[in-house]
Image: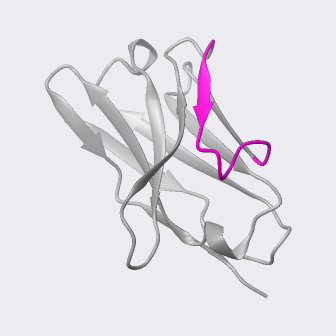
Amino acid sequence: QVQLVESGGGLVQPGGSLRLSCAVSGFTFSRYRMSWYRQAPGKERELVATISSSSISTTYADSVKGRFAISRDNAKNTVYLQMNNLKPEDTAVYYCYARITGGDYWGQGTQVTVSS
């Protein structure tokens, strides 16, 4: 059974930092690209960052370049999203995503709120 479980969200002031984690089980994590998405209230879900299976390649949405960093630990079956210099417009539910043989999988999401 495939499971993606996010953690690390919360309330943070503008300019602050958070580190999200996504623990994965049920498939061979090291073989697949992983992504983080987010969805703000009233908006469509958007791609935030992607990392290749071996961590060689990463891509980011223009809105987070230079502030967010995606990484992974294949020994721990976990993908991370380090978020620095957070802005109110980063407020959203953040989701971990994997497209693997057999289907697309999402985590349950973790809420990030940036507010003073």
Q: In this view, does 5 lie to the left or right of 56?
A: left
Q: In this view, does 92 lie to the left or right of 87?
A: left
Q: Position of residue 24 (x, y in %)?
A: 41, 36
Picture quarter with the N terminus: top left
Residue 33, above or below 95: above
Q: Which residue lies furthest to the front in this view?
A: 62
Q: Where is residue 9 in the image (x, y as percent from the top left)?
A: 60, 65
Residue drawn 35% across and 17% down? 28
Instruction: Find the magenta span and give its range.
Output: 56-67
Figure disc tally: 0
Residue 50, above or below 105: above
Residue drawn 45% across and 15% down? 30
Q: Where is residue 53 in the image (x, y as percent from the top left)?
A: 49, 15
Picture quarter with the C terminus: bottom right
Query: Of residues 50 and 65, which is closer to you in this image?
Result: 65
Q: Residue furthest bottom?
A: 116
Residue 58 forms part of the magenta stretch: yes
Task: Say if residue 10 shows up in the picture.
Answer: no
Residue drawn 37% across and 41% down? 97
Task: Say if residue 76 shows up in the picture.
Answer: yes
Q: Quadrant of residue 10?
A: bottom right
Q: Where is residue 32 in the image (x, y as percent from the top left)?
A: 39, 19
Residue 80, above or below 107: above
Residue 57, above or below 76: above
Q: Residue furthest left?
A: 102
Coloring scheme used: one colour
